[in-house]
Image (tube, rainbow, N blue to C red):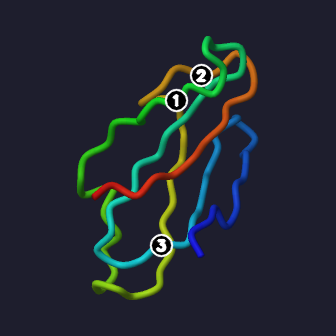
Amino acid sequence: MFRIARSVRDTSGRITIVWDSVGATRYRVQSSDEGTHPFLAFQDIARPACAEIDPAAPGAASQMGFTDDFTLTPRPQRTRYYRIKIVP
């Protein structure tokens, strides 16, 4: 089952998301900030392919993660929602 396994906020406000993944599969993190219009209009967080592809052996069960340190997105003013999509 594809799901986010955990998320943690550190003391500086950075969010780390970890999800169950499959080796050699590409995953894209998306975010949406509360108060944006339309609400929950998710946007891709642009990262290089090497950061999006699970490096485990093809088909192997694995986990991947992403830390939102606000270098790729502006710091949210309110709640930020995340989702992960599989990229063909």
Q: CA distance from mark 2 to mark 3?
A: 27 Å
Which residue is the site of mark 1?
Answer: 70
In the image, is residue 85 above or below residue 60? above
The residue under label 2 is: 75
Q: Position of residue 76 (x, y in %)?
A: 64, 21
| Distance from the alpha carbon under mark 3 to that under mark 1 | 24 Å
Among numbered discs 2 and 3, the one appearing first in the sequence: 3
Q: Which mark is residue 31?
A: none
Residue placed at 55% from the left, 34% from the top? 31
Which residue shows up at 51% across the image and 52% down it? 84
Q: Residue furthest left?
A: 49
Task: Determine contact: label 2, label 1, CB under 8 Å.
Answer: yes
The residue under label 3 is 21
Local crowd size for mark 2, using a 10 Å CA cut-off: few (<14), some (14–19), many (≥20): some
Amino acid type of the residue tagged 2 in the rendering: Arg
- Secondary structure beneath label 3: strand
Mark 3 near mark 1, Cβ–Cβ under 8 Å? Answer: no
**56 above or below 37?**
below
- The answer to whether the residue labelled 2 contacts the one labelled 3, judged by CB atoms less than 8 Å apart, is no
